[in-house]
Amino acid sequence: MRTAWADSVSNSAFEIAVSDNNSLPRPARSTYVPPHLRNRAASNAPNLSGPATERASFSGTAGGSRWSGGGTKPELGRPGQGYGYAGTGRGGSGGGWRSGGWDRREREVNPFGDDDEADVREQAFSEQENMGINFDAYEYIPVETSGENVPPPVNTFAEIDLGELLNQNIRRCKYVKPTPVQRHAIPIALEGRDLMACAQTGSGKTAAFCFPIISGIMREQYVQRPRVARTVYPLALILSPTRELSCQIHEEAKKFSYQTGVKVVVAYGGAPINQQLRELERGVDILVATPGRLVDLLERARVSLQMIRYLALDEADRMLDMGFEPQIRKIVEQMDMPNRGVRQTMLFSATFPREIQRLASDFLSNYIFLAVGRVGSSTDLIVQRVEFVLESDKRSHLMDLLHAQRENGVHGKQALTLVFVETKKGADSLEHWLCINGFPATTIHGDRTQQERELALRSFKSGKTPILVATDVAARGLDIPHVAHVVNFDLPNDIDDYVHRIGRTGRAGKTGLATAFFNESDLSLARPLAELMQEANQEVPAWLTRYASRAPYGGNKNRRSGGGRFGGRDFRREGSFSKNLDYYGGGNSSSAYGVPGNYGGGYAPEVTSAWD
Ligand SMILES: Nc1ncnc2c1ncn2[C@@H]1O[C@H](COP(=O)(O)OP(=O)(O)OP(=O)(O)O)[C@@H](O)[C@H]1O
């Protein structure tokens, strides 16, 4: 059953709940003022009073309501286990919100460009547009959860007590109702549980981890942080593998936290560190960072992780693969970050090979595994085509595609094309060739300066250069509107990389097209590619099926243990068929994967693919 955000809770009910929040008696507090708020007029900071140390107020009774407060286990200090305020959790009557009293709010640039706040406050949920997002596309998405005491999903944002200021920003973003991953992940995260979440590209994972973090920090109300000269103590850390993705998460998180008093700062390599240090010194609640720059800041003792309550790894499988794992271990295990079980850890990706799941479990405590959609698979919203193209014909073939696209105008004026190649040199040379042949193109790869990378991305996004030739640096996470076509000029070695690459189109319910050039150098990808396409209900060319039947199973360097498709199940449950499944429109206790008797490409749940 589809329920709009607006449908389940009437405006008036919601407003009453909000005003109840405001009238809740607040605990008496002393007069601690956080360092970044000192020297400000007292009248500007009505809610600054807080206990000398709020750590104690975090200590709810273990296992109790997250609003229960008054607990007696100060060592827990975990979000989700009581914040020292009375309230009822979901339903909008919880108290303890940071009410936006920080005068920092007044200096914030409005990222939405809607300056009439009253309008946003009064906007009825039902009056919002959904920006053309096709929510029907998500209606029957299969969902698998495992772990102890999994909190139930919600259908609407109104059912979740995120706080009115955050709700206002959600309205401003024109998010009418939560996407499937948000429906499940947000309640889990708000309960303070650790989470390993897999959901398809473009399905709203960023908000799924940002909302609970921002909401949690809003509740925490001026936690006292150590005062050490020039060292800052963020409460949340969000790590991502690329500079551009960190910037994007920062932009998103700034929108979500606008006027909440929660300060988000980004730190990434290739950009001047001094500027980032200055920004950090102005105060930071949520630090979004790439691992290399963070290690630098930690070694300079400019950032301490001692107060981290929330750790989120976006593109978590990439963060834990062989390239990044040592740095992540250093950050999480060898610096001053609170241990797992004390901090809350959330891992998100569209792909999660089981070998990486196993590694990731080192960072998690009693976690919930959530898989929304066929994990590691692509969304059906992307039409996938594979064409057999000899190496020597690739350029002319690309040219044909681009000409046809231009002539047909199929994707409209603003359509952008993202072309993936394997090497940096290959990217430069293809870009040059496209430009001299009348196709405005730019390129992004690791040999370009950060300034050049950012310029290229801006120029692509604006449509000035509607073709971007990229290496895998642009494969993950980037949310660029109007990418109508992704071309895998060179296929990657790893099927998961293919999934992320094509996921740059067909986002947030919109459709997209992905074309891959395949030849005999891609044989190891034949089976996983054919299987993936079949799972996503795509037409698999007969020649690819023939290659697939001859080829050994390859295409994923991380799937060392072989076996199940795409690491798409909780590795803790391997060999077990007992599942806790549901699907949209079907209630909470379905026994099948969305379409009864079907697992994606037509396999009954207990029947494994011929290629397993
Ligand atoms: N509830 C919602 N309603 C409408 N749009 C949404 C909602 N949640 C997220 N979006 C939009 O969907 C798009 C994709 O979201 P996001 O970038 O978080 O996807 P993702 O799952 O992280 O993708 P990837 O796996 O590629 O990183 C964004 O433009 C975002 O603003």
Image: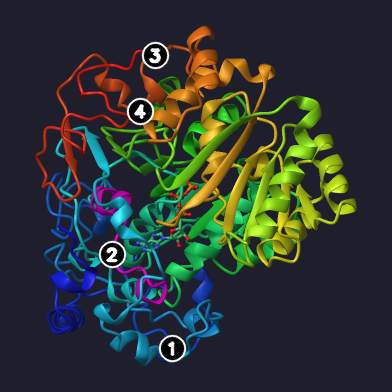
Residue at disc 1, secondary structure? helix
Identify the residue under disc 1. Answer: 44
Tell me which label, 3 or 4, sits earlier in the chain. Answer: 4
Point out the image quarter for the C terminus: top left
CA–CA distance in space, label 3 to label 4: 14 Å
Q: Nearer the viewer, mark 1 or mark 4?
A: 4
Separation (CA) of disc 3 from disc 1: 64 Å
Q: Amino acid at mark 1?
A: Asn
Query: Can you tell me which quadrant of the image ligand 1 is in?
Result: bottom left
Residue 510 image offset from top left, x and y in percent: 44, 57
Disc 2 Cβ-to-ligand 1 distance below 8 Å: yes
**Quick check: is 221 in the magenta stretch?**
no
Circles 4, 2 touching at the beta carbon (< 8 Å) = no
Query: What is the C-alpha distance between the residues marked 1 and 4?
Result: 50 Å
Disc 3 residue type?
A: Trp
Residue placed under numbered mark 3 in the picture: 611
Against 340, is 453 above or below?
A: below
Which mark lies nearer to you, 1 or 2?
2
Can residue 188 be found in the magenta stretch? yes
